[in-house]
Image: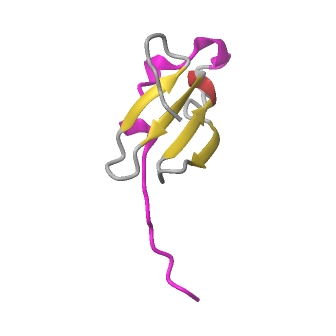
């Protein structure tokens, strides 16, 4: 069996705050899938575009240092995809 090496690792809890969740999705506070990812896409630059359902936004993740560069749907943020 070939070795399985991790090539990129990123944790939502290190970049998102639970208090930013759209409360519309919290019908039962004991069962909140607060970082439910709808999609993850590698862009032409090798970075990632992440859609998180309960934040109502799309975030760009820089692969080289795991930083986020902004979010679509947040007022005042201009994110180039």
Residue at 43%, 11% in the rendered image: 76
The verdict on residue 15 being magenta is yes
Residue 8 in the image: state x and y as whole percent: 43, 59
Against 5, is 65 above or below? Answer: above
Viewer-proximal residue among 61 and 14 = 61
Question: Is 67 positioned to the left or the right of 45 in the image?
Answer: left
Q: Residue at x 61, y 36 (%)?
A: 36
Residue numbers of the magenta segment: 1-28
How far across and down, in percent of the image, does residue 49 sit? 54, 41
Compared with residue 2, is residue 8 higher up or lower down, i.e. above or below?
above
Give the main secondary structure, helix, strand or loop, of the magenta stretch: loop
* Applied colour scheme: secondary structure
Residue 15: x %, y % from top left: 38, 34
Image quadrant assignment for residue 11 = top left
Q: Residue furthest bottom?
A: 1
Q: Is residue 65 left or right of residue 43?
A: left
Quadrant position of the N terminus in the picture: bottom right
**How many numbered circles does the render carry?**
0
Q: Magenta stretch: residue 32 in it?
A: no
Residue drawn 41% across and 37% down? 13
Please report the residue visible at 65 percent of the width from the left and 12 percent of the height from the top. 24
Q: Which of the 4 image quarters holds residue 16?
A: top left
């Amino acid at each position: 069996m070939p070795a399985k090496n991790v090539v990129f690792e990123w944790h939502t809890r290190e970049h998102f705050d639970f208090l930013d969740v759209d409360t519309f999705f919290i019908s039962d506070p004991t069962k909140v899938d607060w970082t439910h990812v709808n999609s993850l896409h590698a862009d032409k630059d090798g970075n990632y575009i992440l859609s998180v359902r309960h934040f109502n936004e799309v975030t760009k993740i820089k692969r080289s240092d795991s930083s986020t560069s902004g979010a679509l749907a947040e007022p005042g943020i201009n994110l180039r995809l």
